[in-house]
Amino acid sequence: MGQGGFPIDLVLFGLIAVFLVLRLRSVLGRRTGFERPPIDVQAAPAGPRPGPVIEGRAEAPAPAPQRPMPDPASPVGAALARIGSIDRAFDPRRFLSGAETAFRIIVTAFASADRSALRPLLSEETYRTFDAAIAERESRGETQKTEIHSINAATIENAELAATTARITVRFVSDQVNVTLGRDGQPVAGTDAVTEINDLWTFERDISTQDPTWRLVGARSA
């Protein structure tokens, strides 16, 4: 106890406490307003993340195939109109969409030797041609690798109507990988590179029947 009964030891303890507080503040520092705020993980948006960026720009989706319609005043346009006059459900744009789907199925099925997928989409004569090509490939122990990367254009090149039999020829411009592999797995034909392929396919249908299927009756490279 000091003079007048004042506890000197309390004064000493108080000075020590003030020293410790100042020491802690100098070590830990204080917020200045420029520190990065804490990240609230739960508050992060749950929506889809942005797509990949290539060379500083967002990657654009693959463009839809071009499907221009023939001039109604042209011979092809007039033939399509005659087909529509008999088959009221016929629509050239819907036909092109279905033809594109058939193109993908047929190309893929031929490469994988899927005869069951080919048969309903081909005429009898065309199916026999495809089947013979597949059988020859199988006899040599070869396999075909085909990938359709994109269909850039699908256009109606010609249309005919003979009695109730309609024929429509479509030009497909597509980017594909086509390579034939031998028994040893080495390429014997084609290439692994993406190549633009120009095809002319002719579809046929008897529009007086209830069968809505347009079957492939001819295919050639253009």
Image (cartoon, grey):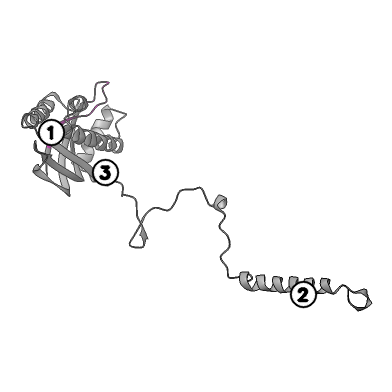
Q: Is residue 193 above or below residue 116?
A: below
Residue 110 in view here:
yes
Q: Is residue 42 above or below residue 17?
A: above
Spatial CA distance of label 3 from label 2 is: 93 Å
- Mark 3 / mark 2, whichever is N-terminal: 2
Q: Residue at x 94, y 77 (%)?
A: 4
Q: Which mark is residue 218?
A: 1
User: In the visual, does 156 lie left or right of 16?
Assistant: left
- Mark 3 / mark 1, whichever is N-terminal: 3
Measured from the top left, where is residue 35 in percent x and y?
57, 68
Measured from the top left, where is residue 154 in percent x and y?
23, 43
Q: Which residue is mark 2?
A: 15
Total marks placed: 3
Residue neighbourhood size for the residue with mark 2, other residues' Cα within 10 Å, grouped as few (<14), some (14–19), many (≥20) = few
Q: Residue at x 15, y 45 (%)?
A: 198
Residue 156 in view here:
no
* Residues shaded magenta: 206-219
Q: Nearer the viewer, mark 3 or mark 1?
A: 1
Residue neighbourhood size for the residue with mark 1, other residues' Cα within 10 Å, grouped as few (<14), some (14–19), many (≥20) = some
**Where's the C terminus, which quadrant?**
top left
Measured from the top left, where is residue 172 in percent x and y?
20, 43
Q: What kind of residue is marked 1?
A: Gly
**Is residue 171 part of the magenta span, yes or no?**
no
